[in-house]
């Protein structure tokens, strides 16, 4: 069964919904497959992950409910007929989220970057006190991992980024909390009629230093300057400006180390993975600076 047909079948069986339109959408950098669905004239996001990642998917959905209870705008998870946030179908776990009104933010627009940073900061503040069994450690990097031998430069570069992070955590007191995981601009929507920015979808939700999420956002700014993004985040007040300035350069490098580490893992099992090779090439350039 094709992916689109499987998603339609899951919506019928899990929610008794038949969308009038279903379009694939990229959630780049995640293990999820996603579609935008029009159901009864309303935009919804359909997300699918392997069953082994169901708990992490549920963590993001529960986090959205947590934010809404605290007055932070977020996409509304639609419970399946079973009452659960997730429905299983043909060996996959599916979620359905009603999208907030508005348009996706643009990573290259300075004004949108301010909205983006502000929304990420408010998300971090709103997640205070949240706990869920699906929240995982924020990285799996180990400098002695065998898969780092896939490229001659990789182990030394990852090891240097790991050592810099270790020094930072020893010398600085970082602010920890719940991380979105993939806070790209398109994970947020701006409603021009109200000026409210809402988070639509979650990445691999985890716990870690909050500036790690900001570093991830900065790397997805499409090559544009990111001063407005950082300023918007700092103004939201989740993390003090001094901490951002000291931690962001280190966490930017470590972000690339985590992406290189994940790509190397994939190449060990799938040597012809073009996406993994491209990620390693980009990481090599970033870590060589």
Image (spheres, rainbow, N blue to C red):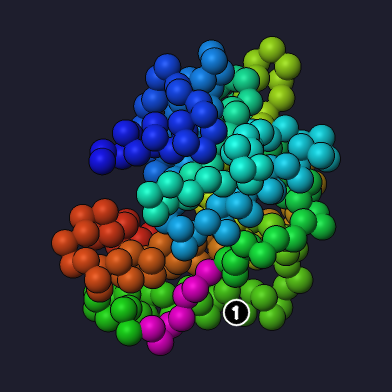
Q: Is residue 29 visible?
A: no
Q: Secondary structure at mark 1?
A: helix
In this rendering, the count of numbered labels is 1
Which residue is more in the foreground, 40 or 128?
40
**Quadrant of the rendered structure where residue 178 is?**
bottom right
State whether residue 95 is above or below residue 30. Answer: above
State whether residue 131 is above or below residue 139. Answer: above
Q: Residue at x 43, y 67 (%)?
A: 257
Q: Residue at x 39, y 25 (%)?
A: 22
* Circle 1 residue: 166
**Quadrant of the rendered structure where residue 259 is?**
bottom left
Q: Position of residue 211 (x, y in %)?
A: 64, 57
Q: Which residues are magenta?
A: 139-145
Which residue is more in the foreground, 276 or 230?
276
Q: Residue at x 59, y 38 (%)?
A: 80
Magenta segment main secondary structure: loop
Which residue is more in the foreground, 210 or 267?
267
Q: Position of residue 19 (x, y in %)?
A: 45, 22
Taking 92 as reference, is 84 left or right? right
Q: Residues within 10 Å of mark 1 (few under 14, many from 20)?
A: few
- Quadrant containing the N terminus in the rendered view: top left
Q: Is residue 150 visible?
A: yes
Residue 199 inside the magenta-drawn segment:
no
Q: Position of residue 41 (x, y in %)?
A: 53, 13
Q: Residue furthest left?
A: 272
- Quadrant containing the C terminus in the rendered view: bottom left
Taking 92 as reference, is 96 left or right? right
State whether residue 117 is above or below residue 214. Answer: above
């Amino acid at each position: 069964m094709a992916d689109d047909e499987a998603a339609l079948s899951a919506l019928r069986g899990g929610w008794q919904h038949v969308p009038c339109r279903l379009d694939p959408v990229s959630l780049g950098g995640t293990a999820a497959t996603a579609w935008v669905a029009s159901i009864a004239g309303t935009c919804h996001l359909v997300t699918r992950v392997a069953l082994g990642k169901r708990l992490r998917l549920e963590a993001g959905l529960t986090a959205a409910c947590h934010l809404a209870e605290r007055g932070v705008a977020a996409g509304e998870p639609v419970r399946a007929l079973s009452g659960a946030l997730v429905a299983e179908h043909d060996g996959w776990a599916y979620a359905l989220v009603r999208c907030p009104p508005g348009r996706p933010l643009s990573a290259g627009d300075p004004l949108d970057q301010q909205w983006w940073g502000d929304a990420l900061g408010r998300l971090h503040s709103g997640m205070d006190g949240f706990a869920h069994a699906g929240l995982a450690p924020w990285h799996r990097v180990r400098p002695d991992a065998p898969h780092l031998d896939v490229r001659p430069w990789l182990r030394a570069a990852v090891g240097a980024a790991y050592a810099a992070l270790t020094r930072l955590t020893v010398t600085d007191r970082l602010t920890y909390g719940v991380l979105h995981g993939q806070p790209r601009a398109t994970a947020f929507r701006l409603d021009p009629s109200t000026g409210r920015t809402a988070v639509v979808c979650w990445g691999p939700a985890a716990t870690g230093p909050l500036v790690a999420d900001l570093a991830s956002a900065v790397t997805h700014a499409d090559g544009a300057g990111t001063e407005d993004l950082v300023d918007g985040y700092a103004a939201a007040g989740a993390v003090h400006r001094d901490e951002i300035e000291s931690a962001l350069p280190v966490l930017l490098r470590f972000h690339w180390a985590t992406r290189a580490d994940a790509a190397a893992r994939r190449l060990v099992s799938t040597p012809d993975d073009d996406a993994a090779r491209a990620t390693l090439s980009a990481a090599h350039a970033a870590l060589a600076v």
